Image (cartoon, rainbow, N blue to C red):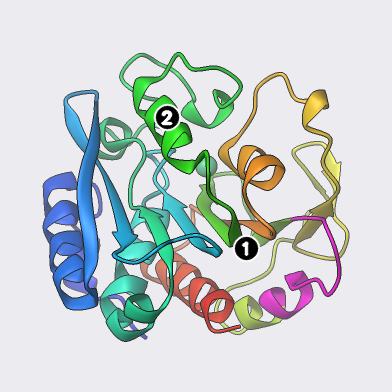
Amino acid sequence: MQAQSSTLFHCHDYQRLVRRWRKVARDAGLQMTAFAQAGGYEVLRLTSRKSVEGGVYLSAGIHGDEPAATEGLICWAEANPELLRKTPCVIFPCLNPWGLVNNSRFDEQGRDLNRTFQHDHVPHLQALKAFLKPLRFRLALNLHEDYDGHGLYIYELERHAPFWGEELIEIARTLIPIESRTLIDTRRVSKPGLLRRKIDIEKFTAIPEAIYLHHHHAERTFTFETPSEFALEQRVRVQVALIDACLRR
Ligand SMILES: [Zn+2]
């Protein structure tokens, strides 16, 4: 599927993103809620109308300078209303709207929100955690980009086989180069482009969303990282393909 090139000029326009999600909510029968305010913007959550227990968690935009994440998620959703309709799911389309509008990794207070899940100082993330409290998901996808990336790479938080990482890398390879570095963020890759690792949450002093989900709520957790120096359209296409591959399994 092609991302509409006209949309790519608008990838930091939050109000436009909200309008697109409102249409997805109508088309797919999802409930859309502005569940909190952050930095002067409403933060959105979309949920299936029936129970979301045992379903899928999709999240993008906690880092606002990673627009292929928010754009990839909406493009995938716009193309898949029927799949969304029948899949129990919770979607957070953009957890840092101020960052998206200002092309910033950080929020309006200079915080990296993806390092704050260990405490409750951030009201909208506190609300998110309260909402998640009783829920378990079979799958959680966290969509990101890396400005140091030389290609696409994936974090697969290890719990039990069969693992999906290798197959996802093969899907991505048809669309974008795979990361060539063997050391990413001081961690050695398992295979080219794949960081599969067991997690001990006690070792984290600054907890990211994916680690929090893996520890408390999700059976399988992935983070996709597209290289943000590549063309936006190509990065969006990869995010869409990876979401699609996971949701159809
Ligand atoms: Zn990120």
Pick whichever, 218 or 114, lies toward us: 218
Residue 140 in view (yes/no): yes
Judging by the rendered image, the residue that carries numbered circle 1 is 152
Looking at the rendering, the stretch of residues picked out in magenta corresponds to 157-169
**3 to 122, vertically: above or below:** below
Q: Please give the name of the residue rendered at 42% of the width and 56% of the height, measured from the top-left corner.
A: 69
**Rendering coords of residue 78 (x, y %):** 26, 75
- Characterize the local packing of mark 2: few (<14), some (14-19) or many (20 or more) Cα atoms within 10 angstroms: many
Q: CA distance from mark 2 to mark 1?
A: 27 Å
Where on the picture, by quarter, is residue 89?
Answer: bottom left
For label 2, the SS is helix
Q: Amino acid at mark 1?
A: Leu
Residue 237 location (% of width, % of height): 43, 74
- Residue drawn at x 30%, y 65% as measured from the top left: 74
Q: Is residue 44 magenta?
A: no
Name the side, left or right, on which 61 lies relative to 33.
Answer: right
Depth check, mark 2 against mark 1: the one in front is 2
Residue closer to the observer: 14 or 9: 14
Q: Which residue is mark 2?
A: 125
